[in-house]
Amino acid sequence: PAIPCSLPRFVREQAEVVQLLEQYGIKASQPFIAVHPWTSNPVKQWPADRFQSLIRQSIERLAIPVVIIGGAEHAARAHEVIPAGAPVADVSGQLSLRQLAALLQMAKLLVSNDSGPVHLAAAVNTKTLVLFGTDAPATGPVRWGPWGEGHAVITKPSMEAISVDEVLDMLQRQLA
């Protein structure tokens, strides 16, 4: 079924995001994935080194540009997830909420822990790949997962139990 609400196109903000992404070498017509490696709760955080490996392999094996998103509080930590020398567009702390919505509308997919941008992506009809590391129904994907169709969820008893290979495999399937 369709999601209960969906947001309009953010035309002006999309133009602003296109200009920003072009500074990182990503053209307006080029598909890319957004990655949000942060959460407000450390228990829901997939390890930074695994995000780093996923990002490296996404660029090298899947040949798709990666855009890191996050708030101003994440900008100083982006180096933890960006592979050394990788051509990653890090826009952490640079977007308004409307610009983030516009970027997510343009993205082919969002890869994220359980976090707010997942729901924003779902509201703008962008597919998500969401990681849940819990066996508690009250904090799991049935209650907190993305609404709508086309989303993928990987859930394990802990975030450490989720491997880079299974996320990369699911990412490949989602992009196909």
Image (tube, helix red, strand yellow):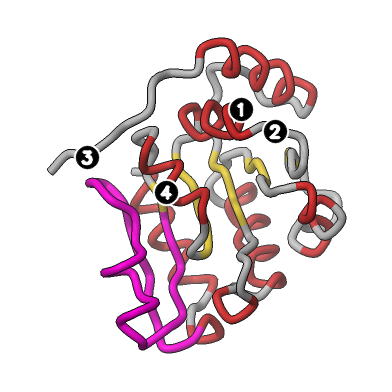
Q: Is residue 23 magenta?
A: no
Looking at the image, tell me whether mark 3 or mark 1 is earlier in sequence order.
3
| Res 172 label | none
Q: Name the amino acid type tagged 2.
A: Leu
| Res 4 label | 3
**137 sits to left or right of 85:** left
Looking at the image, tell me whether mark 3 or mark 2 is earlier in sequence order.
3
Q: Which residues are magenta?
A: 129-158
Crowding around mark 2 (Cα neighbors within 10 Å: few <14, some 14 to 19, many 20+) is many
Looking at the image, tell me whether mark 4 or mark 3 is earlier in sequence order.
3
Give the labeled residue for mark 4.
Answer: 119
Residue sitting nearer the eye, 53 or 149: 149
Give the alpha-carbon distance from disc 3 to disc 1, as whole Å. 22 Å
Give the labeled residue for mark 1.
Answer: 99
Residue sitting nearer the eye, 118 or 164: 118
Give the alpha-carbon distance from disc 1 to disc 4, as whole Å. 15 Å
Mark 3–mark 1 CB contact (< 8 Å): no
Q: Quadrant of residue 153?
A: bottom left
Q: Name the amino acid type tagged 1.
A: Gln
Q: Residue at x 27, y 47 (%)?
A: 150
Give the labeled residue for mark 2.
Answer: 95
Give the alpha-carbon distance from disc 3 to disc 2, as whole Å. 26 Å
Q: Quadrant of residue 155?
A: bottom left
Q: Secondary structure at mark 2?
A: loop
Q: Quadrant of residue 51?
A: bottom right
**Residue 122 at x, y = what percent?**
37, 43
**Residue 114 at x, y = what percent?**
48, 64
